[in-house]
Image (cartoon, rainbow, N blue to C red):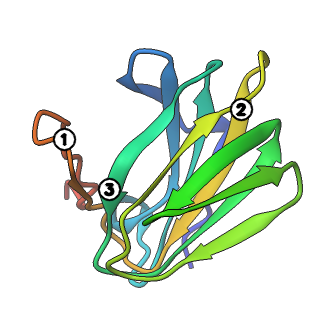
């Protein structure tokens, strides 16, 4: 059973104003899920995208506007939203403070298809 020390995981800049810490993935030995946290500056977040698997998005600190297809919701700290597989979605920080969110994806490898084809796709695969 692998022990994962979240304090040693490094923040990675995914796009200007958005930093990500990959906590659990195939890279850390997971076989069925990926958990990561993001820190987003005011007005920033994740552009419209979809995953082939279900996702749970939880606001740890701050507030986010989250869209699922045409439906828009506002989530506050302590609230979560289940995002079905194959649904276009995204979110943005609606406050002037840093938004802290946690995403849990039902796959050990992070993969997303973006509406904006210029967006960088990232994958977390075991390196060994």
Q: Is residue 47 left or right of residue 116?
A: right
- Looking at this view, is 25 or 121 the one in front? 121
Q: Is residue 17 left or right of residue 108?
A: right
- State whether residue 87 appears in this view: yes
On-image quarter of the N terminus: bottom right
Q: Residue at x 78, y 54 (%)?
A: 75
* Residue 48: image location, x then y, percent: 36, 50
Question: Secondary structure under badge 3?
Answer: strand
Q: Nearer the viewer, mark 2 or mark 3?
A: 3
Question: Secondary structure under badge 2?
Answer: strand
Q: Which residue is tagged 3? A: 49
Q: Residues within 10 Å of mark 3 (few under 14, many from 20)?
A: many
Q: Earlier in the sequence, mark 2 or mark 3?
A: 3
Q: Which residue is tagged 2? A: 99
Distance CA(mark 2)–CA(mark 3): 19 Å
Residue situated furthest front in the rendering: 70
Q: Nearer the viewer, mark 1 or mark 2?
A: 1
Distance CA(mark 3)–CA(mark 1): 8 Å
Q: Residue at x 75, y 52 (%)?
A: 74
- Looking at this view, is 2 or 90 the one in front? 90
Q: Is residue 54 left or right of residue 8?
A: left
Q: Residue at x 30, y 67 (%)?
A: 109
Question: Secondary structure under badge 1?
Answer: loop
On-image quarter of the C terminus: bottom left
Q: Residue at x 47, y 82 (%)?
A: 84
Q: Are marks 2 and 3 in contact (CB under 8 Å)?
A: no
Q: Which residue is tagged 1? A: 116
Q: Earlier in the sequence, mark 3 or mark 1?
A: 3
Distance CA(mark 1)–CA(mark 2): 22 Å
Q: Are marks 1 and 2 in contact (CB under 8 Å)?
A: no
């Amino acid at each position: 059973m692998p022990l994962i020390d979240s304090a040693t995981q490094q923040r990675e800049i995914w796009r200007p104003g958005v930093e990500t810490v990959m906590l659990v993935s195939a890279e850390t030995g997971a076989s069925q899920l990926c958990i990561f946290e993001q820190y987003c500056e005011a007005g920033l977040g994740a552009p419209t995208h979809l995953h082939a698997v279900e996702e749970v998005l939880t606001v740890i600190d701050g507030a986010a506007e989250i869209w699922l297809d045409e439906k828009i919701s506002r989530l506050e700290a302590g609230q979560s939203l289940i995002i079905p597989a194959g649904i276009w979605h995204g979110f943005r920080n609606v406050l002037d403070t840093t938004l802290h969110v946690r995403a849990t994806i039902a796959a050990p490898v992070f993969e997303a298809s973006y509406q904006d084809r210029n967006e960088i796709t990232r994958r977390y695969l075991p390196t060994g």
